[in-house]
Each structure stands twice: as structure tokens, then as C-alpha cells.
Amino acid sequence: MDKNLWNLKPLFGEEKSLQEAIKKGIERAKTFEKLYKDKLFELTPEAFYEAMKTYESICESLSRIMTYAFLRFASNTKEGAFYADCEMRVNAAQESLLFFDLEFNALEVKKQQEFIQNSKEYAYYLELLSKNSKHQLSLKEEKILLKTQPVSVDSFKRLFDEHLSRLRFGITLDGNTKEVGEEEVLSLLYDKEREVRKRAQESLSEGLKKNLDLLTYIYNIVRKDLKITTELRNYTNLEESRHLDNQTTQKSVDSMVKTINENVSIVEEYYTLKAKILGLETLYDYDRYAPISCGEDVEFTYQESKAIVLEAFKEFSPRFHRIAMRAFEEGWVDSHPRENKRGGAFSHSCVPSVHPYLMLNHTNRRRDVFTMAHELGHTIHQTLSYQVGYLNADTPLTTAETASVFAEMLLFEKMKKNLNLEQKIELYAGKLEDVFATLFRQNVFTNFERLVHSKEGELDKEEFCALWQEENQKMFGKSVVLTPNYRLWWSYIPHFIHTPFYCYAYSYGQLLVFALFGVYRLNPIDFVSKYEEFLSLGGSKSPKELVGIFGLDIESNDFWQIGMNEVKLLLKGLREIL
């Protein structure tokens, strides 16, 4: 069986060079602190630019160390002690750099602008920093907040995580009753047997119901904390801090949400079709994830997966194909599961002086082929973005999934040509449900959060439940009956607790990709070079500027509707083959 394994030597060839790098990194960070702490205001624009180059170089060298430590741990989880040791020593170096952002934001506006204007490739990075300056408190106040953080709202987030992880849900299957965790009971909602799905729904609901008072209290604490933070830091509204992190605007987000809300009938239309495909008179909430299996499972060997993904890339862009080939040939990929290897898949951007590293756990399923395309999309994006340097290469969540989801669409278009009718039905249905989970469901989360956070005072559990049921029913219309049990299911969503208004970024990224794919479908020849430029700019420009490369306006409803039309095309494709 053909396999790929990582070659970590480009990072560090031997243990001695790693230890030397750690020692040198700590020394460089301390020297940087001595040179510049409390002295930024004295620098000329030219001297500040040199300081920025040094700062970036130190940050990249520390990231190189942590990349190596993380990859060793990911490939062998017994390396936890090694990873922890590297993290502790690198954190010691990073402490010496903490002053830099804070001190830059404390500069007078005129001085800041002088530095930004003369900082060339770092201008946008510094602009993002300066945007947060008006929300920054005094050093003393920031230290107090940092000190009290473990016993403030963060302690309730931890309580939520620990409590949910300890919950056990009783369920009887094949005459045997057992206790399972949250992940396992949720996975049973995808079972092919309806009775199993129904029992999983009842089990999860019963467990949540017993803990609803505590979960309600935690959510109310999060709501209060967000309001207090918004007031303390002078944000114009409760969402602004999230939009700043995502490098986007309120207008753009509102335009996207409006477009999704206006096209939600797509979901109702699909689930009405799904009921017919499954031969069910009525779909209940526990039927949403029922698998549509119209034939025998098709296996894809690792070699077959590589061949079809590489072919899809080659037909789109020779440059994409070359980067993907390098990944397989030069030790960027760890491809198969093994004992002590971490599960899942990712593409780690590493540092511009090396290359990304990509983890797969290929098991010959069709989903594994799409995972390969997805992660290679990230790898291509990361490789292209190296040209803007370490500090600029990282992208916000709103554009981070652009290349990965686009790569999945390229594969989808390629794969559907080579499947029989039954396999096509399964492919289309699976793709549409993936889209709905990322696009419409996350938008429902956003609508729900906006309602919840707009209310004054504490909400009781019944108010949370009513708002949740109302917003979800709007999405499904008459196609799915949401049972009373479903009313409770807001209570286990971690993003509501950890990062309010985080979920819209998933919808944003998904619909942005579909809009770009719609542009590509209309004019493939002009699209490729612009798209490669888009990816090459990494996080050095805002999403609005990046989309502007195509002559489009991300704050316009028309832009988002292009993406929505692509979703409609998928549904039309399914209808045509039924």
C-alpha cells in the first residue's frame, strides 16, 4: 500500500540544531526587548521599519520551533512531554515580545501613521493593530483583566466544557443499555436505522434537559460578559470585536445574512426531496442526517485518490498541480492512520522559509478523497501566501477556507462525471447536506445569537428554547417537523459560550467560495490568474480588497447572490438525476 510520511528535516535536521534554535530565539527576543521596550516613540520611521523586520524574523523562528514540536506530537502523541517543554521555552521568549503590539497602539496617532506609511509590506498588519488601539485599555487595566481572566467568564467556559465532557447519555440498542458521551450519541443521528436515530435524539434531549438550568445560567453569564466588554472597550455594538478579528465589516456581514435568509427555501425544497428519496411520509429532526445510500460503498485507494485530485488540479491550474505534486514527492504529507498518530486532517502553514505540512488519515472512503482535496487546497493557499512574509501570510477565518472549499468543488465537478446514477444521487445529496451544515445552519446560529444578545436582562430556559425552535423552523419550513425535544439543542453548542458571533464566519467563507466558483464557471480563462493572485496575498489585504480583484463588492447583495445561485445549481443537478 502506497503511503506518505513527513520529512521534518527541512525544519530541524537534528536535536542539537533544535536546541540551539530555542536558545538563540530566547536570546534574540530578550535583546529585542532591551533595544525597543519603552523606546518606540523615539524611533524614526526608518528605524521602526528595521525593528519590524527583526520582529518578524524572531516570530518566524519561534514559529518554526513550535511547528516542529507540534508535528512530532501529531504524528506520535507519546511526544507530549517534548511538545510541552518546547512550548514552555518558546513562551518564555514570546513574553519578551508582548510589549511591542501594546506599545505601538499607545503611540500618538500621528506617529503611528508615520510608521505605517513607511512600513511597506507591514502597512496592513500595522493598520489592523491600530484599529484595535481605541479598544485597548491602560496597561494597568489590561494587567488586571489578564490576572482575573481565569476566574471571570473563562471559568464558566471551562465549566461548560468540563460539564459537557462528563455527561453520559443512556441509550438502549439491540437490547443492550449503555452510557455514551456527547460525541457518540450525536454520531448515532447519522445511523441508517430510523429507530436508532430516534433513540439517540431522545437520549441527548433527556440528558440536556436534566442539565438545562446550569447551561442556561452559563449562557446568561456569557451574555453579561459580552455586554460589559463591549462597554469597557468602546465597541459600537456587540458584534464589532468579532468583525475586527475577521477583518470584515458590519455591512458585509449584514448583506450576507440577508441573502441567506432570503434564500432559505432551498433547504425546505431539498428536505422535501429527501423525504421522497428515503420513502418517508414525514421527516422529523432526527431524520435530517439519515444517510442516502443508493448503491454499494465505493472504495478509493490512496493512489486512486491522489490521481483524481491531482487531475482535477491540473485541469484548473498547472501551478496548483505543481504545488500538490511537490507535497506528495517532498515529504509534506503524512497520509495514513497508525497507532499513537493523531486523528483528523489538517494543513499546517509552517513558515515561509520551509513549506506546509499536511496530515491525512486515509481509509479508502469517498469522503477521504474530498478531505485530501480540501487539505491540499489549504496547502496551496499557504504556499502561495508565503510571498507576503510570515506576519502577512495568515488569513482570517472569513477567507481561510477559500482554497480548501474551492478545491472540493473542483473535485466534485470532476468526480460526478465518472459515477453511475445511484452514486451521483449519493454524491449530490452528501454535498448539499455539507453545504447546508456550513451555510444555512451556521446562519441560523447567527440569527439566534442576535436575538438572544438583543434581549435585556437574564433569559430563562424557556425563552432560549422558544427562540431556538423559532429560528430553526424558519430554515426547514414545512419539510421537517421539529419535535419538542429539539427545543433544547441550543444548550450544547460550544461556540455560543466560547466565542459569541463566531459562527457567521463559516457561512461567510462558504458563500464567498461559491460566489467565486460562480465567477469561475462564467469566465474560467480570466479567473485563474486573478484567483492565484487572491490566494498569494494571504492576509495582507482585507477580504473586501481581495474580492475586489474580481471587480466584485463583498458588501453588495449581488455578490452573495452569485454564491447562492451556485447552491441552487447543486439542487437543480440533484433534481435532474432523480
Image: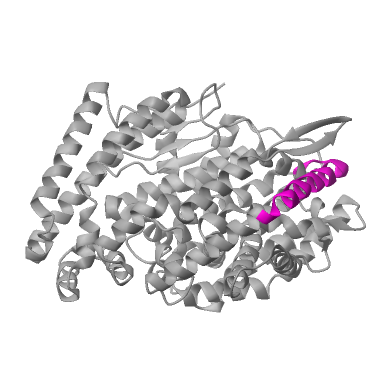
In this rendering, the count of numbered labels is 0
Q: What's the residue at 45%, 69% (across, down)? A: 228
Determine whether 183 is above or below 499 in the image. Answer: above
Query: Which one is nearer the viewer's eye here, 294 or 441?
Result: 441
Q: Position of residue 529 (x, y in %)?
A: 40, 60
- Left or right: where does residue 517 sit relative to residue 214? left
Determine whether 65 is above or below 554 in the image. Answer: above
Q: What's the residue at 42%, 27% (across, down)? A: 80
Q: Position of residue 240 (x, y in %)?
A: 44, 71
Residue 101 colored magenta?
no
Q: What's the residue at 30%, 72% (across, down)? A: 134
Q: Quadrant of residue 30?
A: top left
Q: Position of residue 263 (x, y in %)?
A: 68, 72
- Left or right: where does residue 370 sit relative to residue 21? right
Colour logic: one colour
- Left or right: where does residue 464 sit relative to residue 171? left
Question: Does residue 72 appear in the picture of this structure?
Answer: yes
Q: Position of residue 459 (x, y in %)?
A: 65, 68
Determine whether 87 is above or below 116 in the image. Answer: above
Residue 208 colored magenta?
yes
Where's the N terminus, which quadrant?
top right
Q: Main secondary structure of the magenta part?
A: helix
Where's the C terminus, which quadrant?
bottom right
Question: Does residue 14 appear in the picture of this structure?
Answer: no
Magenta stretch in the rendered image: 190-213
Q: Quadrant of residue 165?
A: top right
